[in-house]
Amino acid sequence: MTQSIKTKSLCRRALQQRNQRVNQYRALVTPIAVHYCRRCPEPLDDLVQVGLMGLLRAAELYQPQTATPFEAFARPHIRGAILHYLRDSASAVRLPRRQMELHDKLRQLKASWSSGHGQEPSCEDLRLALQLNLDQWQELLRGQALARPLDLQTGYEETRLEGAEEGRLWDYEITGADDWDHQGAEVRQQLACLEPGLRRVIQKVVLSGWSYRRTAALLQVSPMTVQRRLKQGLAQLRSALLKADAFPTLSCQPRSHPAPSVAPAC
């Protein structure tokens, strides 16, 4: 009986300590939630609530006798809770219902195509099967790219003390050797017309699969500068290719480069 009373007393004390930590350190949540709110369409209030769940979990697991301050112990739990929520429950962009239905049909079509035709489908095969014109197909591809989960760690290494695991570079494969012989030459020509700084970033990050950090060290700039140059360079390259009517045929199968990086698909 005495042991039971003592156990209940310890549980109440642990619960009180947990609640005290949550109340004392809840201000840690908002800056982290704001950071990710700027990188995705999720409401700030939702991210704050998820972050508070991470803080609560940290308060439950924390051992006061350790040398690690609770503030340092809690941040990874807050950040991890938000990242898990975004990766599992949220998309980068909410697409119209019609687009979502087309994406579902596209996934089903790609999954069943090989068994019925004995080979992987090309983008032209998929477009014709979905009965889409070229404009509708390009819109579907753009929506597919936008709906991919954002690499939410991008740029965050400059704002945190501990190192972040960088994401992987995803892009779209060029399909068809004959297409690439013609279109690849146009891509290389337009790439050569870019400013040297933009061209070099694209060559290193997109073509060679370098990380932002490695590219930044080579160019002696910050990773954020590399990110800005990459975005600017890809936008200029895309615009030039569209004007020249030479935008490469894109497959819908993402592939990962062997070197880690974080970059939007071009």
Image (spheres, rainbow, N blue to C red):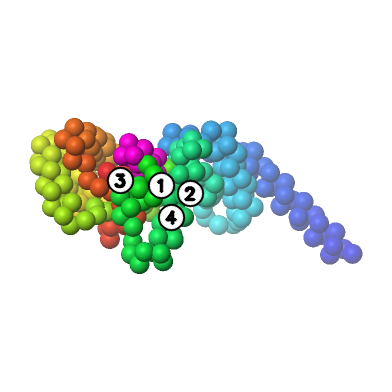
Q: Which residue is mark 3?
A: 265
The mark closer to the camera, 3 or 2, is: 2
Residue sitting nearer the eye, 226 or 116: 116
Which quadrant of the figure contains the C terminus?
top left
Q: Which mark is residue 178?
A: none
Q: Which residue is mark 4?
A: 109
Q: Are marks 4 and 1 in contact (CB under 8 Å)?
A: yes
156 horizontally vs 191: left or right: right
User: Nearer the N terminus, badge 4 or badge 2?
Assistant: 2
- Identify residue type, mark 3: Ala
Q: Which residues are magenta?
A: 133-146
> CA separation, marks 3 and 2?
21 Å
Magenta-span inclusion, residue 80: no
> What amino acid does circle 4 point to?
Leu
Q: Residues within 10 Å of mark 2 (few under 14, many from 20)?
A: few
Q: Amino acid at mark 2?
A: Asp
* Residue beneath the point at 68% across and 47% down: 17
First reached walking from the N terminus: tag 2 or tag 1: 2
